Image (cartoon, rainbow, N blue to C red):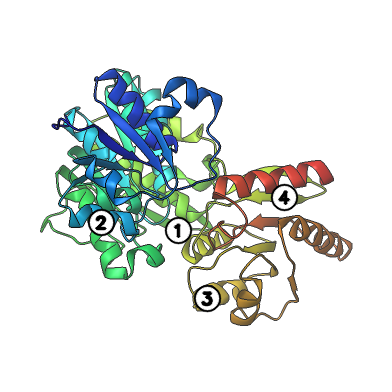
Amino acid sequence: MILSKLPTAIIGLGKTGISIAKYFDKNEVDYHIYDTRSNLIISKKIRNQIGTKKITLGPISIESINDHDNFIVSPGVSLEHNFITKIKSANKNIQTDIDLFDQEKRKNVLCITGSNGKTTVTLLLEHILNSLGKKAKAGGNVGLPALELLETNLEYNILELSSFQLEMTKKISCLASLITNITPDHLDRHKSFENYKYIKHKIFENSEKQILNRSDQNIYKTEKNITFSFGSDKPPNNSSFGIEFSKGLNYVIKGKERILCENEIKLLGRHNLENICASLAIINFLGLDINKALESIKDFNCVEHRMEKFHEKRNVHWINDSKSTNKDSTISAVNALKGNIILILGGRSKTNNYTDLEKVVNKKSVYLILYGECNQLLNKNIKTDNDKIVVKNIDDAVTEAYKVANFLLKKNKDKISILLSPACSSYDMYDSYEERGRHFKSKVIKDYR
């Protein structure tokens, strides 16, 4: 617990900051909350719960820094921020809500991170464990804030941890940890791919067992003999999982045995079979029933904003994959679909190099609609034989996508998928990928139901 005569500073009045305040209220820890957003509207619920006297909006002064010994920082706050530098220079203690969670010494903590797929693995694991009669909840970067998991006596605490959370977290102890994959992402914050990889690997530091992705060369293999693993290849032993392609279908395999076919599940794409392999590797490590786990996987629906097929009409399938905020995730999305694809790309770009995406687009029947802040960048860097349409926003992208779909239907084209998989962050127009995805869906349902 926090040791100081001075109140603890909570930096950030978002979901994480509020959960920290609730935790401190319960444990009788004095605190004050700071948020640099001067124009932030404080809801009535927050005013009643915390009280405005405990909240300061706007720039954080050096005088305010001197009023505290301990600072609990929300993940959205960059370490490069000027006041964070001042806190460090003053030799103050900086922690996160994950550090506070760790101090509670909960048993059976399962930690998951990765560039892509981490949310699907986290929520799938929660689904499997509950279907097996285990009391489990997901939190952290998805679901509940980590500290709210402490309010219930759980058999398994599942934490999804982003690079933003891991960057400032000093320690997280867990029974098992897993990195789904590592590809370049968030380099505007983390500065280099090497630093980003280092941050992701912090999840292994205090883990009793590392569940390893054999297929990803960016994940360090610290064990000579890997017991529990997953990957896109054939497994090296009967404790590990992989994927096999045979006669037009992909199969999940355990050791040498085929245990699940892609046409038995509701999730789309080979990348989701890898996510299933990752989840099963943890289930196997825990010594739980794999056959019962497979039955629960068959019932698992897609996660919102992740290859979410939400509308279908006249053989046109609308898919919301707003969570794909980098090109590698979009590549997986495009590879998951067959037939004609109308791909909506755009937002705030994280790279100038779209060569890999361009190759995938040109291997399939893909029609591009480019929107947002980087629409011209995408237009310049992705070359295709099909016409590209450049628009301002998602509303225009939906309108144009419908026109292209009608054109293809008149040519008697088979199944058409309209896919929002932006390959870019949402921050040019939206506060989150969730807000972007919800806007996309509401526009489609309103105009084309």
Residue at the far front in the pictured view: 63
Q: Calculate the distance from the C-alpha at mark 3 to the C-alpha at mark 4.
A: 26 Å
Residue 37 percent coordinates (x, y): 48, 47
Cα gap from disc 2 to disc 4, whole angstroms: 51 Å
Question: Who comes first in sequence, dot 3 or dot 1?
Answer: 1
State which mark lies toward you, 3 or 4. 3
What separation in Å lies between label 3 and label 1 (alpha carbons)? 28 Å
- Mark 2 lies on residue: 86
Identify the mark nearer the N-term, 3 or 4. 4
| Residue ID for mark 4 | 317
Comes first in the chain, label 4 or label 1: 1
Q: Earlier in the sequence, mark 2 or mark 1?
A: 2
Q: Nearer the viewer, mark 3 or mark 1?
A: 3
Q: Quadrant of the N terminus?
A: top left
Q: What kind of element bears circle 1?
A: strand
Q: Which residue is mark 3?
A: 354
The kind of secondary structure element at disc 3 is loop
Location of residue 154 in the rendering, given as x and y in whole percent from the top left corner: 29, 21
Which residue does the numbered mark 1 point to in the structure image?
245
- Upstream in the sequence, badge 2 or badge 4? 2
Return the residue nearer the eye: 105 or 117. 105
Identify the amino acid type marked 3: Tyr
Name the kind of residue labelled 4 in the image. His
In space, the residues marked 4 and 1 are separated at their CA atoms by 25 Å
Mark nearer the viewer, 2 or 1? 2
Amino acid at the residue labelled 2: Lys
Residue at horizontal 34 percent and vertical 28 percent from the top: 21
Who's the residue at 49% across and 63% down the image?
Answer: 326
The reply to whether residue 125 is visible in this rendering is: no
SS of the residue under disc 4? strand
